[in-house]
Amino acid sequence: MVKIAKILFPVAVPEPFDYAIPASMKLAAGDFVYAPLGKQAKLGVVWGFGEREDIGKLKEISESKPCRSLNAEILKFINFTAKYNCALQGLVLRMVLRSHKALEPSPDVTLFTPTGEQPAGLSATRKRVLGLSDIWPARAGEIAKAAKVSSSVLNTMAKAGFLEKFTAPLDPPFDMPDPAHDGRAFDLTPRQISAGEELQALVRQQMFNVALLDGVTGSGKTEVYLEAAAEALRAGGQVLILVPEIALTQAGLKRFEERFGVEPAQWHSAMGDAARRRVWREVHGGRARLVVGARSALFLPYADLQLIVVDEEHDGSYKQDEGVIYNARDMAVVRGKLAGAAVVLASATPSLESLTNARSGRYHHVILPERPGAAIMPEVALVDLKDHKPAPGKFLSQPLIDGIGQALTQGDQAMLYLNRRGYAPLIICRACGERLKSPDTDSWLVQHKRTGRAICHHTGFSMPMPSACPECKAEDALTPVGPGVERVAEESALLFPDARIEVLSSDTAGNPERIRERMGAMAAGEIDILVGTQMVVKGHNFPHLTFVGVVDGDLSLGGGDLRAGERTYQTLVQVAGRAGRAEKPGRALIQTHMPDHEALVALAAGDREGFIAAELGMREILGLPPYGKLAAIIISAPDAKKADEFAKKTLNAAPRADGIEILGPSEAPMAILRGRHRRRLLIKSEPNVNLSAYMAIWKSRLRPPHKTKLAIDIDPQGFM
Ligand SMILES: [Zn+2]
């Protein structure tokens, strides 16, 4: 028998391929190699070994790459993620290998820094160089540009002893977080300290453990889980803190720095190649000890992971909906298990799945029932829009207007929440009734007044706002229908002409720095009324904010989404929770057409238990998570007939099994997207069924025809 190697490539392949091993080559699982794939030698990873009688025409590995290997833990994690989510193994590996350059050691660069020598009679050029501040140490090119000198001047100055010239790595290591550092301006409360100690005890066990840190908004969950992080850092381990992508753009990061004295390593989708390479390499080498990142940070190659925190664990942005479809919250628990690490799921509004696990004893349940000090929870009330109709063409009812007015009179701030970007969600022609639709997609164009454009929020299609109706050519007949944040801000400005009003949504705020800056301005009291989308919901403390108005509390209710009630409840608790920190009591008003909806009634009554009981009761009857499992198949094709045909074939290929119920095929809620017609099947199973395995068998029986696509979504969250 001849030993062969199984090599996985970071491309769309379902499993590793077999290769012959050159006689002189020593290999272990996790090693990087180059091996021929198609016409070229490609970078792959040794996944394991096998034996063959005869290696015949088997291709040989070209060369091994001398660099640190991937450890067994991440290989297992890739295998599990692929299997559980019915995804291609190679594509999961690709999520791990986000930076090939990170496999090379950091190249050195030459840097200059002043020696302190500054004799009289320096030339003007040299004076300009030594007069630079905030730049040192710096590369020759940077100095030359800043001081407007030629680079050759720098070498002369180094020879003359005015500058020191030295080499250093291009990607410097991250500063070590110091668990003993504590630059916070406040003390933890006794309850926070004891909750922190509970989590520390779990970390100290150095084995897999999950805790749900369940604390009301403003109860100091971050401070508490940072104590768990301190424990893992003291033990020499690595800590990963997952946050919703949006939170990375906000000032929450400052709290990590205050606690540990250094900025953590950050990982998110918008980072550049250089930053990516540096973080990957330092995490792989075990030198980056504290990582704060969006969901994809879970796929970094940690050397010694001892704690994973999933902050705002209920948040929908942990679900990746394209490519490899997975839920980072659930995969974090798996990763913790493989690493033998503690996992902390933190939320003011935990998902029903996590709550059920906590109540059944599978997870530890650490509860923070109150806000610290004198801070009290905001008073929440519903405004029935049937009784309090806004003026025609307006969207704010009198109680909301009064609430804003009262906050401003007291010198406080108000916030209006509406999860709709732009000016109006719909543009309609008064002459012919035409609604402006996104090309080849089942959604309306949204009017953006600030940019003067009509935009599709699903595909990104955008065009200048037309002056005439594209259908009947009537001039000035296009009318905005419904409110977006820009329109609510406009209405507020008419009502409160002296107020400083600001709109904050992903498209108005632009880059992360700008968002951080505007959030800072809000915290500093430089804004009177903040009108915002989802972006303003999370985590930020505004000490002078005492009134929150929710313009449309019904927005995500209805629509047939199984989690609609849960998500509405969670979002509104978070929004209302922005009001009243520190010593000032806060108030939140929610406008609604459905004042009897159980999520809203529970919210107004502050009755979380009541909401959970009702929601769980409904899911138990329907056999939905956490009482059953769910998967979806999405089929898409260039035309409706092809989509229908393949959807029918898919249904006919379903394996027979007990405890499985198949719904559909039916049109997906977004029936046409970017010109592709979409059909959906929903698969419900009893809790003891291995749904991933069932779906894998089903998938193996299907061969989508040319241009038809099939995607499997295990544990779907929303239904698009
Ligand atoms: Zn028209």
Image (spheres, grey):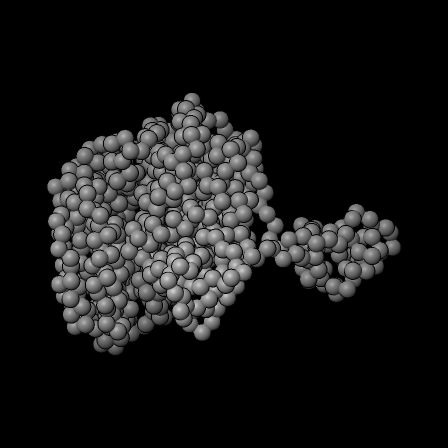
Q: Nearer the viewer, residue 382 or 110?
A: 110
The extreme bottom residue here reads 473
Residue in the picture at 23% in, 75% down:
471
Position in image of residue 609 (x %, y %): 22, 32
Q: Is residue 470 above or below residue 678?
A: below
Q: Residue furthest top?
A: 190
Figure quadrant of the C terminus: bottom left
Q: Is residue 457 above or below residue 386?
A: below
How many marks are shown on the rendered structure? 0
Q: Going by the image, does 403 lie left or right of 690?
A: right
Quadrant of the drawing holding the N terminus? bottom left
The picture quadrant where one finds residue 438 is bottom left
Q: Give residue 495's position: percent from left, percent from top.
A: 34, 48
Q: Residue furthest right?
A: 121
Q: Who's the residue at 81% across and 60% down the image?
A: 156
- Residue 44 figure quarter: bottom left
Would residue 204 appear left or right of 14 to someone viewing this image?
right
Q: Does residue 201 appear left or right of residue 571 in this picture?
A: right
Q: What residue is at 41 percent from the left and 54 percent from the top?
A: 48
Q: Residue at coordinates 39% horizontally, 57% vertically from top-left?
A: 50
Residue 318 location (% of width, % of height): 35, 49
- Is residue 77 visible in the rendered image? The answer is yes
Query: Is residue 526 visible in the rendered structure shown here?
Result: no
Along the viewing direction, whichever of 318 and 135 lies nearer the viewer: 318
Q: Nearer the viewer, residue 541 or 356?
A: 356
Position of residue 278 measured from the top left corner of the image (x, y, whole percent): 55, 53
Q: Is residue 114 above or below residue 361?
A: below
Q: Is residue 628 above or below residue 610?
A: below
